[in-house]
Amino acid sequence: MAKKTDLDQYKEFVKERLKSLLDVVQSVSSGDFSVRVEPPEAEDEFTALSIELERMIDDLIEANSVSEERMAKLQEVIEEKERLFKTVRELSSPVIQVWENVLVMPLVGAIDSARAMRITEDLLTGITKNQAEIVIIDITGVPVVDTSVANHLIRTIKAAALLGAKCVVVGISSEVAQSLISLGVDLSGVVTRSNLQAGIRYAMEMMGLEVVPKKREK
Amino acid sequence: MTETAQVKVAAEAHVYVAAHQVKTLARQMGFNEADQTRLETVTSELARNIVLYAGEGAIKIQAITQGKRRGLKIQALDHGPGIADIEQAMRDGYTTSGGLGSGLGGAKRMMDEFHIESVPGGGTSVTATKWLKEQ
């Protein structure tokens, strides 16, 4: 067997050093930052590389902890946002009993399909719970009434009718009324009144009630 | 004053963002309240169509000038399935989504200029303009 030449020895040395560095890089790339680069016993061609690698790992560890911190904060913000959304959702479609068998549902904000479903659900629950006969839906606070919103409203009203409750829509502004006409939305089957007061008066009439001034006792 | 703006539309929430932006610009430009509401409603219809049929797209809003006239131009762009029969889609009562089916026709009635370009499979571009009436 031939005697190992200096070159062979050097080759082996390089191979070994490279392997140990490769091990470190592989562990780091798989997310294990606990590995350290062994400091070379004597300064050699790999010393500079080792030191740089070590520094890189330190930077990575720092960057990683910063990004983890950010992620945690982001997660917190997301959770907070979800909590707020939930609160808003619950607040946004209240069903209020204003008189025996008479409910008012003031709608505020944009109505998308998810909210429309919720509104219908809340309303139906409210109707059953309060044995409502008349429901006044106030859309004063709805910013845009397009065909989709109108469609949602009509469906909600139909669902309420199935439970025997009659809906009155109030709070259609003159601008919204003009848009609805241009859109060709047919609200002919829907009872509408200009404002909440008129809606309540209508409800009173339907219930056979009237509001009269109190007689003064003499 | 923002002369042009583009709103990405990929979810229902963006519909209101776009509609609100148009209303704000319309108010700044001096449109009366009825026209502000019309522009807002048209934007809402167009943006909703994007979400409903294409999934995502954009609403471009522009304050434009033509000679002495000033107007507000709304463009709804998407790369969705396109509209096979535009004439049919414009007709009141026609719907493929279970809606009321008067959105596009209604939107056209509310605007001064209304133009649809669509290639089946290649997306849709709706351009709608309303001119500011001379005071």
Image (spheres, rainbow, N blue to C red):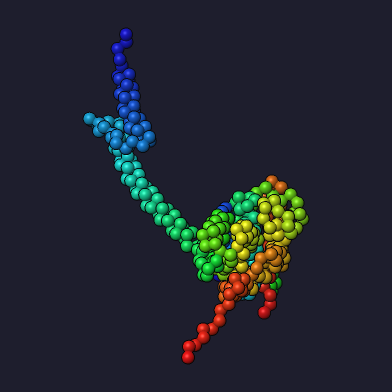
Residue A8 versus residue A75 in the image, above or below: above
Where residue A172 appears, as percent x and y from the top left, is 61, 70
Which residue is more in the foreground, B49 or A40? B49
Which residue is more in the foreground, A137 or A135? A135
Where residue B33 appears, as percent x and y from the top left, is 62, 73
The answer to whether one can see residue B12 in this image is no
Quadrant where the N terminus of chain B sits is bottom right
B90 horizontally vs B17: left or right: right
Most distant residue in the right direction: B87
Residue A118 versus residue A135 in the image, above or below: above
Where residue A49 appears, as percent x and y from the top left, is 32, 35
Count the numbered circles shown. 0
Residue A7 versus residue A28 in the image, above or below: above
Q: Which residue is pictured at 49% across the width and 59% down the height?
A: A89
Q: Which residue is pictured at 63% across the width and 52% down the height?
A: B52
The answer to whether one can see residue B56 in this image is yes
- Image quadrant in which you'd find residue A16: top left
Most distant residue in the left direction: A41
Most distant residue in the top direction: A1
Q: Which residue is pictured at 67% across the width and 70% down the height?
A: A178
Which residue is more in the foreground, B126 or A58? B126
Most distant residue in the bottom direction: A218
Which residue is more in the foreground, A95 or B7? A95
Q: Which residue is pictured at 48% across the width and 88% down the height?
A: A217
B118 horizontally vs A30: left or right: right
Where residue B90 appears, as percent x and y from the top left, is 74, 57
Quadrant where the C terminus of chain B sits is bottom right
